Image (cartoon, grey):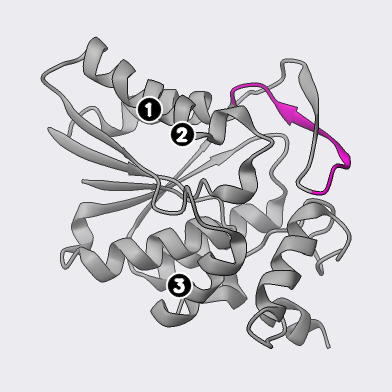
Amino acid sequence: MDVILNSGGLDSAVVLSLVTSMQPHKQNILAVNFIYSQQNSRGVASAKKIADYYKVEYVSQELDLSWPQMQTLDTFGKPRKLLKLRNLVFVANLIPIIAEFDSVRIWGGWNADDFNYPDAQVGFLNALQKTFQAGEPSWDVQIMAPWLYLTKNEIVGIGLKLQTPFQLTWSCHNKIDKPCGTCDSCIQRNKAFASYNLVDPLIKEDN
C-alpha cells in the first residue's frame, strides 16, 4: 500500500502525482490528511480535492496538537512557530490507519528547502525507518522521501511534467481566500513558478 501524507500543499501534491504515475492500481493508494491547529481550512479542502482529482482513497483525521510550539526560523530567516516533532506525530498517527497492511510505503513531501526543520531531515527520517525495523521487524514499512535533496523549483518542474493540478493546491499560512504573497510558503512557491517563467495558477485565478 502506498500512503501519502497529503497536506494539500504543492510538495505532497507532486508526490501524489508521482505515485499515481507509478502505481497502476489506485485501490492501493491512500491519501491521508491530518487536521491540526497550524493547518487552515483551505489546506484541508485542497487535500480532499487533490485526492478526488486522482480518484484515490482519502482519509482525514483531526489531531489535538495543543502542546507548546517551538520558535524557529523559516526558510528566509523570519521567526516562525512550529509544532515540535510534527512529522513524528503524523507518522505515529498513521499506524492505526495502516496496521492492516503487510507492506506499506509512507510518502512525504520533505525537501531541501526544509533545512530549518530537524524532523524533515535525512537523519530523522532514517531514524524513523530504523524505529519501524526495530519495533516491528516483520512489518515491511518504508519511509519514502523522493524530494529530500530537491528544491521547490525542482519539485515544480517535476510537477509540470507530471501535470500536477497546482490550481487545486494551497500553501499559504496566513489566508484562505487568496495567497498572502508574504509568508515563506508563498514566496517559495512564487519563485518556483517564476523560475519557469510561469505565474502561480492561484494568483492567475485571483486576477
Residue 147: image x %, image y %?
Answer: 46, 54
In the rendered structure, the answer to whether residue 137 lies left or right of residue 206 reads: left
Q: Report which residue position mark 1 lands on.
A: 126
Tell me which amino acid carries mark 2. Answer: Val
From the viewer's side, name the closer residue of 84 and 55. Answer: 84
Residue designated by label 2: 122
Using a 10 Å C-alpha cutoff, classify the residue at mark 3 as few (fewer than 14 neighbours), some (14 to 19) or many (20 or more).
some
Mark yes or no: residue 62 visible. Answer: no
Could you say where residue 186 lies in the image, as x and y percent from the top left?
77, 62
Q: Earlier in the sequence, mark 2 or mark 3?
A: 2
Question: Which amino acid type is shown beneath numbered disc 3?
Answer: Ile
Q: Secondary structure at mark 1?
A: helix
Secondary element under disc 2, as helix, strand or loop, is helix
Q: Residues within 10 Å of mark 2 (few under 14, many from 20)?
A: some
Chain part drawn in magenta: 76-85
Residue furthest to the front: 149
Asked which quadrant contains residue 142, the reply is top left
Closer to the camera in the image, 92 or 15:
15
Task: Tell me, yes or no, whether the two marked residues, 1 and 2, touch with CB atoms within 8 Å.
Answer: yes
Asked whether 23 or 100 is in front, the reply is: 23
